[in-house]
Image (spheres, grey):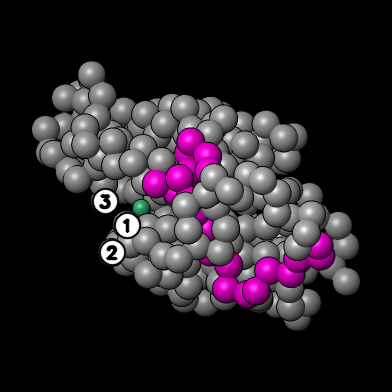
Amino acid sequence: MFGKPDYDALAIGAHPDDVEIGCGGTLAKLARKGHKTAIVTTTSAELSSRGDTATRAKEFAAAAQILGAHTHKMLDIPDGHVRASQANKLKIVRVLRELRPRVVFTHHWVARHPDHQHTCELVQEAFFLAGLAKIDTGQKPWRPYKLIHYPNRYEFQPSFVVDISETFATKIESIRAYHSQFHAADMEKYGSVQTAISHPAFLDHIEIRARQYGIYIGAQYGEPFLVRENLAIDDPVALFDEKCWYTVP
Ligand SMILES: [Zn+2]
């Protein structure tokens, strides 16, 4: 109906660093498998307490390269004021039609940061609208196959967990690429304001969460995801094997 996809996976976050924290291990794993991936942010994080937008853009580019993303871009929706307006929906529709991704990852809708919540809402709506031929952006319509949510600060009961044991170090490397945001030897260069994420314990929290979800699937590290629809399984016998003995209920 819509023709062929171009990208395999597109991850959308409100700010440069959200995707790396939410699904960086999975993106790195997908890239290693040969999938074509992209990262898009709705804002350029100009309200960030530390650093500036030029630094953040450089850090974003470095993180995207570490994760093996084929494309990365920042949209121009104002930081702190992401809303599901008609103009903003069309910005996401254009991205979806340009990249034609098979699957899209974005924030879960329950979030402490309003931009995360509203980016989720924007992407959910654009996901549907991008498939409507009469919404004219001068591009062919496209509807990705599945919208997949990664967690924010609040956790959820996941639909599935991806084993990221092989790419957890790459995920951390992509997060550490944001020298202005997370604990680093040169962090004083980017301002003296301490934030929740500039504290060294924040990186420990990322590791603890990845270990927690790893335990649930019998792996060293895992990333949880949620899809709203039921997942169809063709052969439940082939799906389960002795590895299931080692998972915690
Ligand atoms: Zn954010």
Query: Percent from the top left, x then y, of residue 67?
Result: 56, 33
Query: Percent from the top left, x then y, of residue 161?
Result: 55, 52
Location of residue 51 by image quarter: top left
**Which tag, 1 or 2, sits closer to the chain's start?**
2
Residue name at image x 63 percent, y 70 percent: 127
Residue name at image x 86 percent, y 57 percent: 4
Q: Which residues are magenta?
A: 212-235
Q: Which residue is mark 1?
A: 153
Q: Could you tell whether 190 is left or right of 173 in the image? A: left
Q: Disc 1 vs disc 2: which is toward the camera?
A: 1
Please tell me whether residue 109 is drawn above or below residue 149 in the rendered image. below
Kindly identify the amino acid type of the residue bearing the numbered disc 3. Leu
Query: Percent from the top left, x then y, of residue 156?
Result: 41, 65
Q: Residue furthest bottom?
A: 134
Residue 231 belongs to the span the image colors magenta? yes
Tell me if residue 57 can be seen: no
Q: Tell me how far mark 3 sits from mark 2, CA to CA.
A: 16 Å
Residue name at image x 13 percent, y 39 percent: 194
Q: Could you tell whether 36 is left or right of 11 in the image? A: right
SS under mark 3: loop
Q: Could you tell whether 61 is left or right of 27 in the image? A: left
Residue name at image x 65 percent, y 74 percent: 230
Please tell me whether residue 182 is drawn above or below residue 15 in the rendered image. above
Q: Which residue is mark 2?
A: 112
Location of residue 26 by image quarter: top right
Answer whether labels 1 and 2 touch (C-beta < 8 Å).
yes
Residue 155 belongs to the span the image colors magenta? no
Q: Which residue is mark 3?
A: 47
Q: Tell me how far mark 1 sits from mark 2, CA to CA.
A: 7 Å
